[in-house]
Amino acid sequence: MADITPARPPEGATGVLVLADGSLIWGRGFGAQGEAVGEVCFNTAMTGYQEVMTDPSYAGQIVTFTFPHIGNVGANPEDIEAINPHALGCIVREDVTDPSNFRSTQNFDAWLRSNGRIGLAGVDTRALTRAIRIQGAPNGVIAHSPKGEFDIPALIEKARAWPGLEGMDLAKEVSATQSYKWDDGLWTLGQGYATHSANPEGPHVVAIDYGLKRNILRNLVAAGARVTVVPATATFEEVMAHGPDGVFLSNGPGDPAATGEYAVPVIQKLLEVGTPLFGICLGHQLLGLAIGARTYKMHQGHRGANHPVKRAGDGRVEITSMNHGFAVDAESLPANAEPTHVSLFDGSLAGLRLTDKPAFSVQYHPEASPGPQDSHYLFEQFVAQLKPAA
């Protein structure tokens, strides 16, 4: 990627992205000062930058936004998927402007700064995105210094020394550390999130938190479930102690094979006793590993709110939100598993179900509502199968 930008900093440069191959991408720093190292990826969504930055699945990653006007609607305390941001930083084309939105309570620049996350503006994000598409997601360091002072050789070495996401278990770092109840529902204009709206008589779903997004829990509640969240490292006995009618396997960051070292045995035991399972993103990959399939690191990954997915059953197409750098190899599925969804971008597996167990999963995020409600049926389908027959 050395041809993206000249090595010498342009006048006024206060930020830089340093890649492991020595490429230097200069810009104007904003948000927090300092530096952070991780994988550089891109996201094609036009909205939802605050949700992206707080999505635990982005742990260990620096996000390049392809939409040029990031930050234009500001930030607020509602549009978050976790208490703290998990993406390490963001790269944008245009400078962050004053917000223009009635829901905004804070400038995006100030929000990043208060949360210790670095931004880099003034970058040719189209060129960087093309480079990632061709050469794959690189390791890099994003740095911000108001004085424009950087130790470039040290930053290059830091980028080169970072081991990369392959083989890295990040679920433990972003997961809840103890179990808790969740009973809030979906957001509506003028009212905010529905609070204490869980059905006390509804089926009980235990959600294993590998890095879950809050809106997943809200959709489970909206579908009629009572929800208890348990840590990623919860044992089979700890999960079953809550008396689940069904178990949800959440999204999350890192390499599924690494997280699978402790997650897969639990899932396999859940399958053995016939517990209904529903997985999203990392949860989909872990279910795949639990039934003997393989996962692999993708060249560039899928990250955006405009990914078309085709359903195998009726051929209908869902517009989905995706955020994953690993995938389940469809060719490795066992005889008792069948593909249910496929990406129309590259043909990769986007969903599966077991023919002999009440378990299914999708690679995309139905709770993110890009369709906007193309995929909400999945929550209703899962919760409905947990209810006793009338």
Image: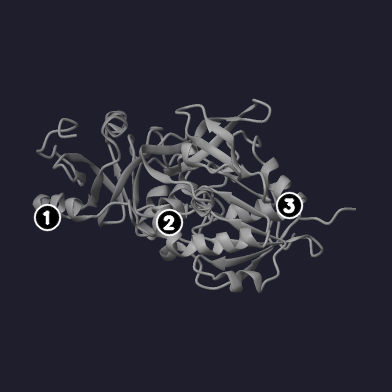
**3 or 1: mark nearer the eye:** 3
Q: Any mark on residue 85, and which?
A: 2
Judging by the rendered image, the residue that carries numbered circle 3 is 383
Q: CA distance from mark 3 to mark 1?
A: 52 Å
Residue 169 screen position, x and y as percent: 38, 59
- Mark 3 and mark 1 lie on one chain; the one further toward the N terminus is 1
Dot label at residue 346: none
Q: Residues within 10 Å of mark 1 (few under 14, many from 20)?
A: few
Residue beneath the point at 47% across and 35% down: 45
Query: Which amino acid type is shown beneath numbered disc 3?
Result: Val
- Whether the residues at callouts 2 and 1 have beta carbons within 8 Å, the answer is no
Residues tagged 2 and 3 counted as in contact (Cβ below 8 A): no
Of 297 and 199, nearer the camera is 297
Residue 43 appears in view: yes
Q: Is residue 266 above or below residue 56?
A: below
Q: Find residue 120 and report its image quarter.
A: top left
What kind of residue is marked 2?
A: Pro
- Is 137 in front, or is 221? 137
Residue 154: which numbered mark, if any?
1
Q: Quadrant of the N terminus?
A: top left
The reply, left or right, for residue 256 in relation to residue 350 is: left
Contact between marks 3 and 1 (CB within 8 A): the answer is: no
Disc 2 packing (10 Å; few <14; some 14–19; many ≥20): many
| Alpha carbon distance from label 2 to label 3 | 30 Å
Answer left or right for 273 relative to 1. right
Q: Which marked residue is nearer to the observer: mark 2 or mark 3?
A: 3
Residue 297, position as x, y percentages in the image: 36, 43
